Amino acid sequence: MIGTTISHYRVLEKLGAGGMGVVYKAQDIRLGRFVALKFLPDDFANNPQLRERFQREAQAASALNHPNICTIYDIGEVDGRVFMAMEFLDGVTLKDLVLARPLEPDRLVEIAVQVLDGLEAAHAQQVIHRDIKPANIFVTSNGRAKILDFGLAKINAPSRVKDGAAAAETIASGEYMTTGGGALGTMPYMSPEQALGKPMDARSDLFSFGVTLYEMATGRMPFQGDTTGVLFLSIVQDNPVPAVALNPNIPTELQRIIEKCLEKDRELRYQHASDIRSDLKRLGRDFSSSSSGIAAVVEPVVADDPSGKSRASSKDTARSQAPTSASTTTPLRARTRSKTWAFLAVLVVALAAGGVLNWRSLKKVVLTDKDTIVLADFTNMTGDAVFDETLRQALSVDLEQSPFFRIIPEQHVQETLRLMGKPSDAPLTPEITREVCQRTNSTAALQGSIAQIGTEYSLDLKAVNCASDESLATTEAQASDKDHILDALNVAASSIRTKLGESLGTVQKFATPVEQATTPSLDALHAFSLGVKTKDITGDEAAVPLFEEAIKIDPSFAMAYALLGTSYSNLEERSRGAEMLKKAYDLRERVSEHEKFYIEAYYYDIVLGDLTKAMQQYELWAQVYPRDDRPVGNLGLIYGYLGQHEKALAQAREALRLQSESGLRYSNLVQGYVHVGRLPEARSTAEEARIKRVDSPYLYLYSYQLAFVQNDVAKMAEEVGRAAGKPGVEDMLLAAEADTAAYAGHLLAARDFSRQAIASTKLTAEKETAASYEAAAALREALFGNPDVAQQHAKAALATSKGRDVQYASALAVAFAGAWQRAQQLSEQLSMDFPDDTLVRSVYLPTIRGQIAVSRRDSSDAIELLKIASQYELGMPGDAEFLPSLYPVYVRGNAYLAAGQGVEAAAEFEKILKWPGVVLNEPIAPLAPLGLARAYALEGDTAKARSAYQDFFTLWKNADPDVPVLRLAKAEYAKLQ
């Protein structure tokens, strides 16, 4: 979207998002001015009701030309994208200004008078706003207040009700009735008649303005409730806490104005916006010379109701429908509460006057960017199983957009559950979540619940301190029906983010609605949620059908394609994985910024193999989300591919710091230490992972590789034994055993281990992994002098997979086997299939073509072709199952031998010997001393040549006697005697 032109507007940047649209800053290229473009979400564009609301907002606001109402310039539709062009405003909403603290008196009057000017203009044009609240009032940087969001406005309604008879006549006409007699608006700001679903007139806006005025003066909303029902009763029955009880410095006249705005009986309420404006202007004149400000906000410490539940916290709610009727009898509890508040008002004033009460000491504790959160399962009181797992996953997606918060990953939660002696899929009840929270040294647990009353749904979120179980923040949102639950969750999530300390700027910037970031289908989201949980607990193979089900329900579900793609890639089905990631990439405009980073980075990395672009995306991802370990860890892998092993090690350490309970991060750090030869640190890291009981398939493999470099045969055998019978792990260790056997010249044993590894892949249907083992066997046989067997393995590998690494190993094996024409064909296919791949262009193709040139006895051409590979020649491309490292070096060494340049050849083979932690047990590792011996012999240094030959024979002292390369070496050595 950024940089594109919609109609005659060029989109410049994203400003924010909400349930009813995404807003961008754009430039009108015809008039040269900045505008704000509000787009109806794609999934809503075909919803007649939502389109009608969007149209109504444009019609209502465009009919009003007033400096205190946001100007609407245009409305249109381009390529199915419905948009509204409106005045671009620089500033913040009134909600941002209040943020739980009162405004200064002069500021309060200045803003309130401007809002009333705008309301008076709207009412004069027979427009009732019906959703006046601080979030819909914008204050520009130059101090001008603007009324926003006329999406719920009622048009063609008389704005001034001159007397009760006129009002009755208007009401009788039914002109104000909302659809189905339900209530529209935001519950805490509704008038009593609005909450009851009764007909409304302009005086309802004045009640909502009174609620807003109360909040401006005290930092709190007048009507409180832990549930929708309690809040509803508070609005229609209770008198609010006197504003002076919360802010003793409020002038008496302001208290009177607020009380008159909040009259339950609209006949006793202010009748016109101009009347309130006049009273406020007089008030402003009376205290304009005073320098005293309004006192800071107080949390009423004795304001709990008899049930013990605090009624102090405000509730941010979604637009909803309230019950259409309620008892009008004032209960005894409400009458008693009024007396209690009167007493509290006196008490608070007295304490403040005496300096006893520290107003700011009672401020709610918020989180910092160092804290972590554990998500509990939602308490589902609806009986509808579709909400199980779904809402928790949706909330996780919503919160993970935030660069501020860090949610404890599922794998860490599951490991903790196991340490607690519970199943890894145990329900995360509030009690269990709190213990998980404490064990993971997290700060807060976030609990959610959903309930249904009639067709309406109520969502509650509550953050509690893990150590004290003290409530840190609560919020609530309502949905009028099942189709709007995700919309309500967006509202609740944004509210809880703000209340827990995240800056309003990032909340607004990173707030893609969850139905856009994931899917508007609860059924598809349910399948996806189960897939995510299954992927973490059981593995990728079991998760695949669930992701496929999510895509079947919603073929536009971008993140389902993305996770399906990574699951296929983890199962070594890279071609299928690339296909799914490509689909996710094509749909990436639908997702949140956080998930967009994921999709784009993995697309460049896994699908295209363009490591330059992938690194750029990972770096940007890490900058925007500095607490996410994935971009850091993947950057480390890329550095390893490119041979920058110290940088790779640094990234691996940082990734483990960010995710200290991840088996994958531990395994990557072990691998990094092995690469650079820091073996004691590699061993201590592996042991630390075992002590902490974190696990990863790669810990087995990298611990095996560490033991190999240390020549610890017992430890290698231990790792193989631990992996036995574990799908997806056993085959890797068997393949490693095959390479180790070949390293010692035990070719028959290597062949047997390879067969076992291939058979083991059938347990997980990993066809591409099996193909990579076939390709590795092909390389081994070709290097050891069995060209026919090598070509058979290469053919079998390519029949199973056309994956990048399989093609590379097969083509190189065929080239080593001397079938250079076939190798040339395979290299051309590899080039066509992966035109953007960094490793293919810079390592794989030069190596294959260099070996083809050697086979054709054109050594000078081989040396020239391999120059491009020199920058990455120390890298470890491929994957855990197949790491064809240092092959450009080996081929270059043979090219120098063929060219008669012994010194240069010796330098290449010495590189291989210098990097044992990189070459590991690859078949070129034992052949490096043989190549070095040939180089010394070429230079006439018989003593060094004889010593190098003996090094090779020592490695292969128990080798199979009929291996061709061994027989050839012995013949060469005999000539030196």
Image: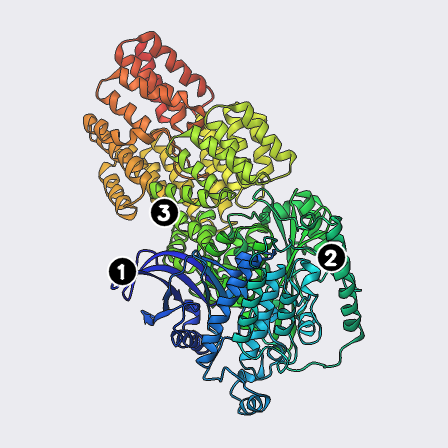
Q: Of label 3 and label 2, which has the lower sequence position? A: 2
Circle 1 — which element?
loop
Label 2 neighbour load within 10 Å: few <14, some 14-19, many 20+: some
Q: Nearer the viewer, mark 3 or mark 2?
A: 2
Q: Which mark is residue 604?
A: 3
Q: What is the quadrant of residue 499 in the picture?
A: bottom right
Q: Quadrant of residue 481?
A: bottom right
In the structure shown, which secondary structural element does the residue marked by tag 3 occupy? helix
Q: Is residue 79 above or below residue 904?
A: below
* Of the pair 104 and 964, the residue shown nearer to us: 104
Q: Which mark is residue 251?
A: none
Judge the density around disc 3: few (<14), some (14-19), many (≥20) Cα neighbours within 10 Å.
Answer: many
Q: Residues within 10 Å of mark 1 (few under 14, many from 20)?
A: few
Discs 1, 3 touching: Cβ within 8 Å: no
* Amino acid type at mark 1: Gly
Q: At which x and y percent is residue 32?
A: 27, 60
Mark 1 — residue? 32
Q: Nearer the viewer, mark 2 or mark 1?
A: 2
Colour mode? rainbow
Residue 349: give its label: 2
Q: Which is nearer the N-term, disc 1 or disc 3? A: 1
Locate residue 182, reporting x and y percent: 58, 80
400 left or right of 576?
A: right
- 932 vs 653, left or right, is left
In this view of the protein, can residue 466 be seen by the observer? yes
Mark 2 belongs to which amino acid?
Answer: Val
Position of the N terminus, as image quadrant, is bottom left
Visible residue check, residue 792: no
Q: Position of residue 909 (x, y in %)?
A: 34, 21
Label 1 and label 3: CA atoms lie apart by: 36 Å
In screen coordinates, is 755 left or right of 821? right
